[in-house]
Amino acid sequence: MENCIFCKIANGEIPSATLYEDEDFRVILDLGPASKGHSLILPKSHAANIYELPDETAAKAMVLAKKMATKLRDGLNCDGFNIVQNNGEIAGQTVFHFHMHLIPRYEGDQVGL
Ligand code: 5GP
Ligand code: ZN
């Protein structure tokens, strides 16, 4: 989709700090991290939100979230983990290309979700 920043990042047209990439997804570090290691899972195909996301992509995204959460936990030695996904402005969505937040949590951190 034209003028969608996450389409451009996911497809490599705009460079990003990439942790993982395959034919369907790119996982990047969030530009304004809520905690150390805060990352985003971006599908390469545009869907504005979970309602538009194809079932196959949704299933693959959850398996990837599990894999990345495990990798981040092992690498960062965090104490807990949030996986968050916002739909609609009222829910806090600011970029209208489906994405999942991977948020490592640490004892005493001040992350407000
Ligand atoms: P939302 O509020 O839509 O659920 O999450 C959007 C997230 O994308 C925010 O955490 C914000 O920091 C992040 N973000 C916005 N623009 C960019 C960008 O250009 N690059 C990266 N890496 N993250 C971005
Ligand atoms: Zn997009």
Image: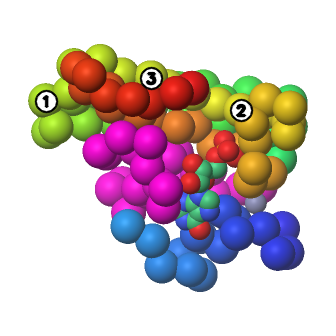
Compared to residue 42, the image places residue 59 above or below, namely above
**At label 2, which amino acid type do we have?**
Asn
Q: Which residues are magenta?
A: 18-46
Residues at marks 2 and 1, CA–CA distance in whole angstroms: 26 Å
In which quadrant of the rendered image does the C terminus lie? Answer: top right
Residue 57: horizontal and vertical position, in percent?
65, 36
- At mark 2, the secondary structure is loop
For disc 2, the neighbor class at 10 Å (few under 14, some 14 to 19, many from 20) is some
State the image coordinates of residue 53 (x, y, percent, origin top left). Answer: 78, 36
Q: Quadrant of ligand 1?
A: bottom right
- Indicate which disc, 3 or 1, sits on the residue closer to the N terminus: 1
Which residue is the site of mark 3?
82
Vertical arrangement, residue 53 with respect to residue 33, above or below: above
The amino acid type of the residue labelled 3 equals Asn
Q: Can residue 67 be seen here?
A: no
**Residue 71 lies in the magenta-colored region:** no
The secondary element bearing badge 1 is classed as loop
Dot 3: what SS?
strand
Mark 3 touching mark 1, by CB under 8 A? no
Q: Separation of disc 3 and disc 1 at Cα?
A: 14 Å
Instruction: Specify whether 77 is left or right of 52.
Output: left
Ligand 1 neighbours mark 2 (CB distance < 8 Å): yes
Where does the image place residue 110, in percent across and percent down from the top left?
A: 39, 29
The residue identified by callout 2 is 86
Q: Who comes first in sequence, dot 2 or dot 1?
A: 1
Q: Is residue 39 magenta?
A: yes
- Crowding at mark 3 (Cα within 10 Å: few <14, some 14-19, many 20+): few
Is residue 65 placed above or below 35 in the rendered structure?
Answer: above
Which mark, by number, is residue 77? 1
